[in-house]
Structure formats: C-alpha cells, structure tokens
Image (spheres, rainbow, N blue to C red):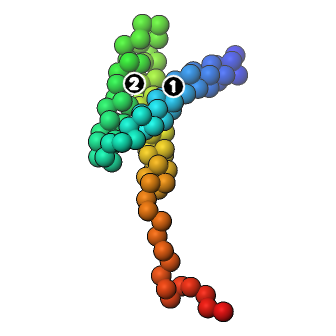
Amino acid sequence: MLIAFLLFLILGAIVTVLPGALLGYGCVAASGSMSLGARIALLLFTAGASAATWLMLVGISHMWRPAAAILSLAATAASGALFLTIDTYKRRAPRRPHPAWQVRN
C-alpha cells in the first residue's frame, strides 16, 4: 500500500512538473527578441499563470491543489531560468583572452 502511494506521488509530480518545464522553455524560446528584463517578467508571469491554472482545475482534490500549483510554479520558473541563462550566454559576444594569458612559443 505504501509503495502504491509513493508511486502515485511520483507520477503526480511528473504530471505536474513536465508541463511547467515545457512551458518555461517555450516562454524563453518564444521571447527571443525581447530584452532580458522583459523576458524575466514574462517568465514570472507565465509561471504565475501556470500555477493559477492548477489551482482552478476541477479534477484535482482541494488537498492537492496547492502542492500542484507550487510544483508547477517552481518547475516553470526553474526551467525558464535555466534556458534563459543558456540563451544569454549563447548571445554574448565572444571575449578575447587577455594578452598576458597567451602562451608564447
């Protein structure tokens, strides 16, 4: 019985976290032409909207709604922040090494 309950919790976490992670990635991918501040604001708004959606779903018990909302908020924000960081580093101009660091033959 305990194993079935833990399996239920793990599957529920996957079902809750996966859409949030995909939503965070999609938000960063779609906002490529915006400034960094606007992208962060849009990501936070998307994470909040995702959490609010989980709070309003009819099929979830009242006991699990706050947990689902928190998991979705965290997954959306973490996924978006990760991909935003990767995208920011990709867009930076390459930096030349300091002349003193170059090895002379």
Q: Residue at x 34, y 25 (%)?
A: 49
Is residue 42 placed above or below 97 in the rendered structure?
Answer: above
- Mark 2 Cα-neighbour bin, 10 Å: few <14, some 14–19, many ≥20: many
Three-letter code, disc 2: Ser
Residues under numbered marks 2 and 1 in contact, where contact means CB atoms less than 8 Å apart: yes
Residue 54: x and y, percent? 41, 18
**Callout 1 amino acid:** Pro
Other residues around mark 1 within 10 Å, as few (<14) / some (14–19) / many (≥20): some
Taking the view exactly as shown, the residue that stands out farthest to the bottom is 105
The residues tagged by marks 2 and 1 sit, at their Cα atoms, a distance apart of 9 Å
Q: Quarter holding the C terminus?
A: bottom right
User: Seen in the image, is 34 located left or right of residue 94?
Assistant: left
Q: Check disc 2 and report the residue beneath it.
A: 50
Q: Nearer the viewer, residue 29 or 14?
A: 29
Q: For numbered disc 1, what is the local secondary structure?
A: helix
Q: Position of residue 32 (x, y in %)?
A: 40, 41
Identify the secondary structure beneath mark 2.
helix
Q: Quadrant of residue 3?
A: top right
Q: Which residue is mark 1?
A: 19
Q: Is residue 45 left or right of residue 26?
A: left
On the question of residue 77 being in view, the answer is: no
Q: Residue at x 48, y 65 (%)?
A: 94
Residue 102 in the image, given as x and y percentages of width and height = 56, 85
**Location of residue 72 with respect to 33 vertically, above or below:** above
